[in-house]
Amino acid sequence: MLSRLEELALVTRCVAADDRNAFGRLVKEYSPGLRRFLLNLTLGDASLTDDLSQETFLKAYTSIRSFQGLSRFKTWLYRIACNEFYTYMRKHKEGFGDAGETPSEELSFSHHATEARIDVQTCLKALTRTERTIVLLFYLEDQPIKKIAEITSLPQGTIKSYLSRARVKMAKVLQS
């Protein structure tokens, strides 16, 4: 993982010298984690994950001059990814666990999926988009609540409430 200083040096090279290699290094560093986050957010839709990941990096590259360095580059990048996901969802009106919507009971998994993966996917489908985003950032990406608040633009208390509700929902799914 890049240090904060290395991130700022790469961003500075991108802004000052339009150094595409520096941005390429940022992409190489953060792409696997971002893709994993988006893949889980889209409930395993690899094609949508590819599209959202590409849009996220394109938007980051074209907007890199607006990066102020107040947070880590990764936090800023994940914020863009969340915005891209929610924009896509608004445009296409797809469920993916939308608020007020009952989760789909029909699950499609490959025959090679493990029971644990099925349980995780089932739990994620039971959550709203916001709950799923917060759970993935907290548990999968190991982000602290303060960073999640920056990424989602939600107060820290609200993040804690969403995590608590999500845990209850996931426990109910696993018990049934």
Image (tube, grey):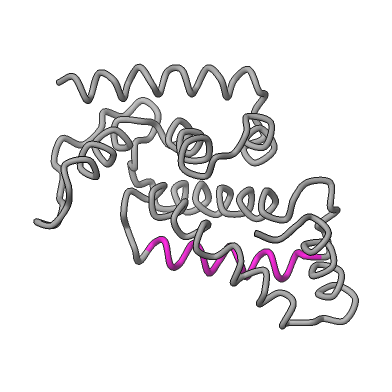
Residue in the foreground of this view, choosing between 1 and 42: 1
Query: Image quarter for residue 124?
Result: top left
* Residue in the picture at 49% in, 62% down: 52
Residue 26 screen position, x and y as percent: 67, 69
> Which quadrant of the figure contains the C terminus?
top left
Residue 48 screen position, x and y as percent: 39, 62
Vertical placement of 71 versus 130: above or below? Answer: below
* Residue in the picture at 35% in, 17% down: 168
Query: Image quarter for residue 165?
Result: top left
User: Is residue 9 on the magenta stretch?
Assistant: no
Vertical placement of 112 versus 157: above or below? Answer: below
Extreme residue toward the left, this view: 111
Determine whether, in the image, residue 90 is placed left or right of residue 112. Answer: right
Residue 74 screen position, x and y as percent: 66, 54
Residue 6 screen position, x and y as percent: 79, 64
Give the mark count: 0
* Residue in the picture at 49% in, 22% down: 162
Determine whether, in the image, residue 117 is placed left or right of residue 134. Answer: left
Vertical placement of 160 versus 91: above or below? Answer: above
> Which quadrant of the figure contains the N terminus?
bottom right
Extreme residue toward the right, this view: 16
Residue in the foreground of this view, choosing between 144 and 161: 144
* Residue in the picture at 77% in, 62% down: 7
Q: Which residues are magenta?
A: 48-64
Magenta residues, dominant SS class:
helix
User: Is residue 50 on the magenta stretch?
Assistant: yes
Residue in the foreground of this view, choosing between 112 and 86: 112
